[in-house]
Amino acid sequence: MSNLVRQCAVCLAILCFAIGVSTTAFAVPPGEVLYDPAFHDISGGQCCFSFNETVSVIEPAKPVPVVLTYEVSFFEGSSFIVGLMVNGGPCTLYGSGFIPRVADNNPKAFQWIVFPADGLRAGTNTFTVCGGSVFFNTGFIDIQQITLAARLSN
Amino acid sequence: MNKLGIRIAIMCLLVGIATAAFAVPPSEVVRVQGNQTFTGTCCFPWGETVTVIEPRVVVPVVVTWSTDYLTTAGNVVFEVGVSVNGHPCLNRGTLNEFVSPDGTATSSTFQWLISPSDGLIKGTNNITLCGGSASGGSITIGFNTLAARMSK
């Protein structure tokens, strides 16, 4: 009887440990979200260059798609396009990306989906906003109130 | 010791099942990298569908669609929404005329909250993008993403 109790206790301990690990895996690491209220005059010219805004996610052994949302208030500038650099790769459009030259001062929101085939790998993956002017080397855009968030999908 | 091994295996299986229950099915997200032009009065399917699998007690679903687009000129307004399991097009938002001054497009993002009363059922639910013109003209949809997420 005492053997049975001991075995059950060991099993329970292992189960609790496994649940703990599993719960931790679902928690949102700080790197998955970014908020930057500051004003930025982005004047790097024609697409594409980094906007220096990065979030990261930790992928399981078998990577799953990542859904990213980027919201920004913009004020004036050239026709711009925004995309993502995945793990330092080339700037790519993973969904919508146009910010028109017409300034309406309203926040713009974008949703991007990155699939495993786009270069995701097990462990830490970084996503950096990038882009630039569509036409001109002298293009610029003024933005602020930036949020960038990533979440794992499947 | 064999019994202990079997018990550990069963526990691991249970944990695995629990983990799988939290996973999001692949069809909850769609990404389109190309252009599609639509003409016609609202509402008809726009060819993009995501799927969610609802539990026994059906919960609301949040659907987000983000797109580049441009329209023809002439006060063109297009409506866009979602159809749940083949029901009529719901929650329609508007894509206002955008004729670019320099040949580029603009972008717009919509988020819809679908309630169980909108036609969600236990099990597999198909949520299809739909819409059409409210005033004539045509719209060209560029790169876009559609994603569904069950609320908790």
Image (spheres, coloured by chain):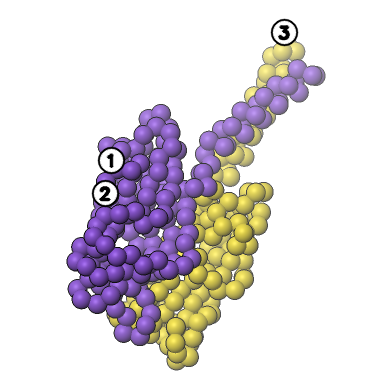
Name the foreground residue: B122 vs A109: B122
Residue B70, placed above or below residue A16:
below
Farthest bottom residue?
Answer: A138
Residue B95: where, in percent of width, then height?
27, 66
The residue drawn where x is 27% and y is 49% is B89
Q: Are the residues tagged 1 and 2 within 8 Å (C-beta)?
A: yes
Relative to the observer, which residue lies in front, B57 or B97? B97
Given residues B4 and A85, the one toward you in this image is A85
Query: For mark 2, does the 10 Å Cα neighbourhood hold few (<14), some (14 to 19), or many (20 or more) residues?
Result: some
Pointer 2 indicates a residue of which chain?
Answer: B
Q: Residue at x 27, y 46 (%)?
A: B88
Q: CA distance from mark 2 to mark 3?
A: 62 Å
Q: Which mark is residue B118?
A: 1
Q: Colour of chain A?
A: yellow
Q: Which residue is mark 3?
A: A1
Residue A133 lies in what quarter of the image? Answer: bottom left
In the picture provided, is B42 more to the left or to the right than B35?
left
Query: Which mark, by number, is residue B44?
Result: none
